[in-house]
Image: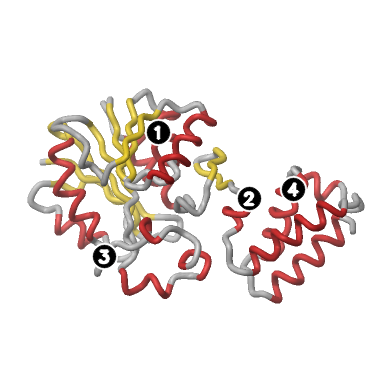
Amino acid sequence: MTVREALRTARRELVRRHVPSAGLTAEVLLCHVLGRDRAWLFAHPEEALSAEEERAYEECLRRRAAGEPTQYITGVQEFYGRPFRVTPDVLIPRPETEFVVEAALEAGGVKTIVDAGCGSGAIAVTLALETRARVIATDISRAALAVAQENARRLGAAVEFIECDLLSAFASGAADLVVSNPPYVPEGEVAGLPREVREHEPAVALDGGAEGLDYYRRLVEEAPRVLRPGGRLIVELGIRQMEAVIEMARERWEPVKKLSDLAGLPRVLVLRMR
């Protein structure tokens, strides 16, 4: 089977199984199997696959057709222009989370940053590489921390990792900035998420309690202890959660910036401690 034939067959099967972006998915998975990039595929359509490569490609397609995310099959997701390793122990980094990084980079005078609930380490590693700040990342999941540590080592980022629940391990005045992409899906909506998310991504990184706001309540209560005077808290939000979080933070925090994603939806909130 040639590259052209393999892609044609794969696209047809993925379309039949209602897999989104079937053509791109077929190409990405074949690149993964062959260890090549997409430009190589287009330049070598008559290249023959070995029997072993055909079997490996068929297995990747089977897994994707069954609902497993492409990123877990390839083990990689790009974030802020860098390849991050991902496994089913961590949430797959989303493009909108890059706005958390952008907001953090705009904050001045930051010497110490804490990423609360770091998952794959995408935010923490990126900030360590893009700033001169000391970066500390936490997660309650030891398996997630192992993935984040691997990403930090592979990308050459100096990040300190702590196994704890959000900010519980920190003393007073430990940081200038806390960032977080916490679980924010209301528990009643988890069952309605796409199959790829619902059945494969870690529930602990998705379920935000009855209204999806449980972790925001904890962050706005705990962060003042961890932050130095004038410190900031930057959080990613679920859709329609912006005003609820601003209201719960009203007594101790001042909202200083709201960022929308590429679809125009409010997704990132910057709060400054009063």
Q: Name the image colouring.
A: secondary structure
- Farthest-out residue, top: 132
Q: Which residue is mark 2?
A: 74
Mark 3 residue crowding within 10 angstroms, few (<14) / some (14–19) / many (20+): some
Q: Which residue is mark 3?
A: 209
Q: Which residue is mark 1?
A: 127
Point out the tag, 1 or 3, that comes first from the N-terminus: 1
- Determine whether the residue tagged by mark 2 lies in a helix, strand or loop: helix
C-alpha gap between disc 1 and disc 2? 25 Å
Q: Which residue is mark 4?
A: 38
Q: Amino acid at mark 3?
A: Gly
Identify the residue at horizontal 65%, vertical 68% (top origin).
Answer: 65
Task: Tell me if label 3 and label 2 are in contact, CB under 8 Å.
Answer: no
Say left or right for 64 vs 99.
Answer: right
C-alpha gap between disc 1 and disc 3? 28 Å
C-alpha gap between disc 1 and disc 4? 29 Å
